[in-house]
Image: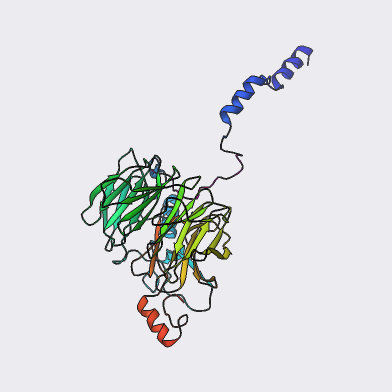
Amino acid sequence: MDDSTFNRQRDQSAPSTPLSTPTMQIRRMINSDHNGCPSRAIYSDRFIPSRTGSNFALFDISNSPATAEDGSCTYNGLLREALFGFGKKDSSGLPSGRNIFRYKTETKQPLHSLQPFRFDDELVHGIKAPMKMKILGSPYQVTELCDLGIDDEICSIGWDQRGTQLAVGTRMGKVQIWDASNCRRVRTMEGHRLRVGALAWSTSLLSSGSRDKSILQRDIRAPDDFVSKLSGHKSQICGLKWSYDNHELASGGDDNKLFVWNQNSTQPVLKYCEHTAAVKAIAWSPHQRGLLASGGGMADRCIRFWNTTTNTNLNCMNTGSQVCNLVWSKNVNELVSTHGYSKNQIIVWRYPTMSKLATLTGHTCRVLHLAISPDGQKIVTGAGDETLRFWNVFPSSKSKKTDDKLGILSFGRSTIR
């Protein structure tokens, strides 16, 4: 090999000339992640992202029967059966794939009714969606209530105490009142500058919490959009709940604060600062006046109990997961919590011992939404996996009275314990 051939091969195998320093800096700026370190996952505590731009046709799960010659059809059939329970049924008549809904009992007593069910006549609840609102009624019946179009989105909903009117908070900072029975919008109220992420009713008074850090008190009988403004939080409002006697309002914020207000105050009368993450989960006890429960987000993971009558911190329970929702049973002294990262589970607790009665699993994303039926027995959970799941978790008030008479409150139930 002569020298010219050797030099030519060496030039071809040599690395290309590195970019100039300014060019590399510009490329790094364009490709940089301004939200933080790329290796660190970022989670949100409250809202499910809009799916309006998603192309679900990419999944292409066919409904045609699988054949031995077509491997993709076989795979699709197995996947469809695992996810939706199509195919064989067991002796009880339920799909064999129903084990996608699972529960783990924390006691030795049987829990027979913790299998999810589809719809119930007594449970009517709105579904959080990016733009449309639908009502679940009798079995297999869905009624569209409203469509906000492409310019706005639904961020929160709340039934009034009679179950006849539904409040809808939007991304544009508006609050709409809808007559659910007639599918008619009663009025639209303004006042917030940013999205309305929390709503709470107290008879004719509606409280709305926004990303603009304010809480507006709205009397739907008055012509004005709001009658008072509550200020105190330093970040967006992500939780609101009125006490059962309608005397106290609890609010949780992204500033990790839990505040308590009375009917006439525009400044919080009680401030609790022990949580170390956003406070979205709030629940008042129907059994003891002034007993308040609150749950913290991913950096906190605790359920705390407060006595607002004596202004004392009663207890703290570390759950191991971000606490998204809390609701207290009105039939028995128990409560249920839903969780996000990292376990995405639902837990039923006995108060005040805070012993676990059941752990319900099945959701694959954060369980961001929770509602309880009017009879106090059933709950519905909604998660970032875009599914609603319905559960029987609490006994009826009639069975509670029977158990009290027999003196076997915890052992006389045939439903969940």
Query: Which residue occupies 59% across, 38% down?
Result: 36
Q: Where does the image place residue 211, in percent across and percent down from the top left?
A: 44, 44
Query: Which residue occupies 31% across, 50% down?
Result: 133
Secondary structure mostly seen in magenta is: loop
Q: Quadrant of residue 319?
A: bottom right
Q: Where does the image place residue 318, in percent across and percent down from the top left?
A: 59, 62
Instruction: Tell me where the magenta segment starts and ends, as one range.
Output: 37-51
Q: Residue furthest top?
A: 4
Looking at this view, is 256 or 375 the one in front? Answer: 256
Image-based side of 222 in relation to 157, left or right: left
Looking at this view, is 244 or 330 the one in front? Answer: 244
Query: Which residue occupies 36% across, 40% down?
Result: 172
Q: Residue furthest front?
A: 264
The vertical placement of 282 against 359, above or below, is above
Q: Where does the image place residue 305, in percent across and percent down from the top left?
A: 53, 64
Image quadrant where one finds the N terminus: top right
Query: Which residue occupies 41% across, 62% down?
Result: 243
Residue 127 in sight in this render: no
Q: Residue furthest left?
A: 182
